[in-house]
Image: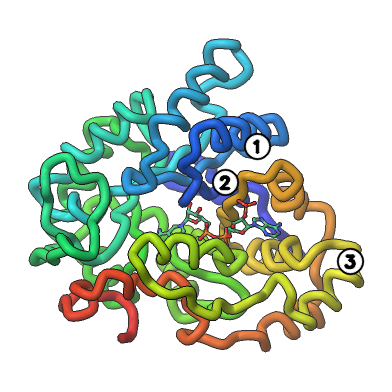
Amino acid sequence: MAAKIFMDMPGGLKMPAIGLGTWQATDEAELESALDAALEIGYRHIDTAFVYQNEAVIGRVLQKWFKFGKLNREDLFITTKLPMPGIHQDRVEMFMKKSLENLQLDYVDLYLIHFAVGTKYVENQARPSPDSLQTVPTDHVAIWKKMEEQVDAGRTKTIGLSNFNVKQIDRILKSARIKPACLQVELHVYLQQRELVNFCHQNGIVVVAYSPLGSPGYNKFIAQFGKEARKLPDMLHDETIKKIATKHKKSNAQVMLRYLLQRSIVAIPKSVTPARLKENIDVFDFSLDAEDMKALDNLEVGEQARVCDFKVFPGLLDHPEFPFSK
Ligand SMILES: NC(=O)c1ccc[n+]([C@@H]2O[C@H](COP(=O)([O-])OP(=O)(O)OC[C@H]3O[C@@H](n4cnc5c(N)ncnc54)[C@H](OP(=O)(O)O)[C@@H]3O)[C@@H](O)[C@H]2O)c1
């Protein structure tokens, strides 16, 4: 069964079907060595966000690679995201410029609205804290016009959405001059997002799966907010996946990623561990057959398996644009 190595984007741009996730990769030395290892192995697609607070490290490592002539800017596909305090028509350009400055780049390949709800902007605050989090009215159509201006200004090649639902994407499609090129959402074997994926594919929108391995590091993230660890869906030890993995002499992670590729979905697994970086991109030399795909389809749990539910930010749940079911 086919799995594309690149996904076609507007303007002839090609998004590598496996990218490197970098959320929670903030230790400078660890991230630098992970990026060096990833680029050596062949990763050419990096996913970051203003809120991850690691754009500057990524920028520094990329400059090093450019300086030594090991890579050219055009070899890479770089995605970053408009943070929640920037999700307002008055703040898109400012945050876009901040990200470019951090990344030491003239342009990114893809700029995403990180979430469907904006929060209050407090100067010099990099990320919303539970205490200060206050949502603001969020006018997607007005914000999208500002996103389009970033393409016009050459600051990004394409623009897209993250954590938007069908209704919200449809509303933007109806007024857009430049269509969203991509939707990035949580997507894995237990949360298959079929309606959303079909809608995007019918509208020529590339779907990128975040937390494709089920985000096993998520509890570390919520601990910062004083939240207790949650029981997370554990696909890395799922017996059905294990059986398929054994049959193909691959790991559970590789089967989970390959499953997404065969559904024409891009995956951006995060790792700072060289052996795992290698494992996660080594998914182009085997195919899942129809029986494997069916068994994996049947593992769908749905909404209950969502890991990144954004419920650590209680103010969001009551906002009219909160994109997930409560
Ligand atoms: N748009 C959004 O709102 C949003 C939300 C969440 C994530 N994302 C993006 O999507 C990326 C991926 O999602 P994620 O970080 O939530 O979760 P993930 O990629 O599903 O899982 C990452 C975790 O799995 C571990 N891991 C990686 N490869 C493994 C393997 N082969 N075997 C066993 N464990 C493995 C990593 O550990 P080590 O690093 O220690 O190896 C890390 O703890 C993020 O990094 C970010 O770029 C976007």
Q: Residue at x 58, y 66 (%)?
A: 216
Q: Which residue type does callout 1 highlight?
A: Ala
Q: Position of residue 166 (x, y in %)?
A: 34, 76
* Residue 34 % position (x, y): 62, 37
Please, is residue 224 above or below residue 79 in the view?
below
Task: Indicate the secondary structure of the residue bearing disc 2.
Answer: strand
- Say which element carries label 1: helix
Tag of residue 38: 1
Disc 3/disc 2 C-alpha distance (Å): 24 Å
Place residue 92 in its image quadrant: top left
Q: From what the image shows, is residue 145 above or below residue 312?
A: above
Does the numbered disc 1 mark a residue whose Cβ is under 8 Å from ligand 1?
A: no
Q: Which mark is residue 20?
A: 2
Q: Is residue 31 left or right of residue 297?
A: left
Taking depth in this image into account, of 265 and 178 the one nearest to the observer is: 265
Disc 3: which residue: 248
The disc labelled 2 sits on which kind of residue? Leu
Q: Earlier in the sequence, mark 3 or mark 2?
A: 2
- The part of the image, by quadrant, that contains residue 326 is bottom left
Question: Do callouts 3 and 2 mark residues in contact (Cβ within 8 Å)?
Answer: no
27 left or right of 55?
right
